[in-house]
Image: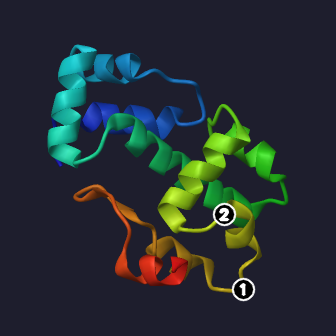
């Protein structure tokens, strides 16, 4: 990963639960918002907002494991504006709803390894999640 966007990555990791704007993240790198969006997409193969949502979803799975909070409490605690957006992003990454993921008897660590996103390839379905969804 390029050092040029490292401050933005750190900013998103630290402030994921807040309603942060991509312009604020761009400022952490000293870039204009439009330049930052281009550089980030070029380096990470995904939009900054997609990366931020990936961080939020990752933190939500940790909260599912550690707490008995409700789905909506976790969604808001992780920075999502509403439960619908949380559910949509969760399904996009894991191929299942947060409720189904939480209730699954599979090992949570194995579930995390099946996320449908990598920083090098961007949003995509893995072969195993495609066959599971069919």
Q: Is residue 84 left or right of residue 11?
A: right
**Residue nearer the viewer, 2 or 32:** 32
32, above or below 119, in the image: above
> Which residue is found at the position 71% from the left and 67% from the top?
65
Residue at mark 1: 105
> Which residue is found at the position 50% from the left and 23% from the top?
20
The image quarter containing residue 12 is top left
At numbered mark 1, what does the secondary structure look like: helix, strand or loop?
loop
Disc on res. 10: none
- The local crowd at label 2, few if under 14, some if 14 to 19, many if 20 or more residues have their Cα within 10 Å, is some
Pinpoint residue 103: horizontal percent, then vertical percent.
77, 75
Distance between the alpha carbons at the discs numbered 2 and 1: 14 Å
15, above or below 63, in the image: above
Q: Is residue 64 left or right of residue 1?
A: right
**Residue nearer the viewer, 95 or 9:** 95
> Which residue is found at the position 39% from the left and 44% from the top?
51
Earlier-in-chain disc, 2 versus 1: 2
130, above or below 36, in the image: below
**Residue nearer the viewer, 111 or 86:** 86
Display colour scheme: rainbow
Q: Is residue 48 visible?
A: yes
Total residue callouts: 2
Pinpoint residue 74: horizontal percent, then vertical percent.
73, 47
Pinpoint residue 117: horizontal percent, then vertical percent.
37, 61
7, above or below 122, in the image: above
Disc on res. 97: 2
Q: Is residue 84 left or right of residue 30?
A: right
- The local crowd at label 1, few if under 14, some if 14 to 19, many if 20 or more residues have their Cα within 10 Å, is few
Q: Is residue 2 visible?
A: no
Q: Choose mark 2 or mark 1, whichever is in front.
A: 2
């Amino acid at each position: 990963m390029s050092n040029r966007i490292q401050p933005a990555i750190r900013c998103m990791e630290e402030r994921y639960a807040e309603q942060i704007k991509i312009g604020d993240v761009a400022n952490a790198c000293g870039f204009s918002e439009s330049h930052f969006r281009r550089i980030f997409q070029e380096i990470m193969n995904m939009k900054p907002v997609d990366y931020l949502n990936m961080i939020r979803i990752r933190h939500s799975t940790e909260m599912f494991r550690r707490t008995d909070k409700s789905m909506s409490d976790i969604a808001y605690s992780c920075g999502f504006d509403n439960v619908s957006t949380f559910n949509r992003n969760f399904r996009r990454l894991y191929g299942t709803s947060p409720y189904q993921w939480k209730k699954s008897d599979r090992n949570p660590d194995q579930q995390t390894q099946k996320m449908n996103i990598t920083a090098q390839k961007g949003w995509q379905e893995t072969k195993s999640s495609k066959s599971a969804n069919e």
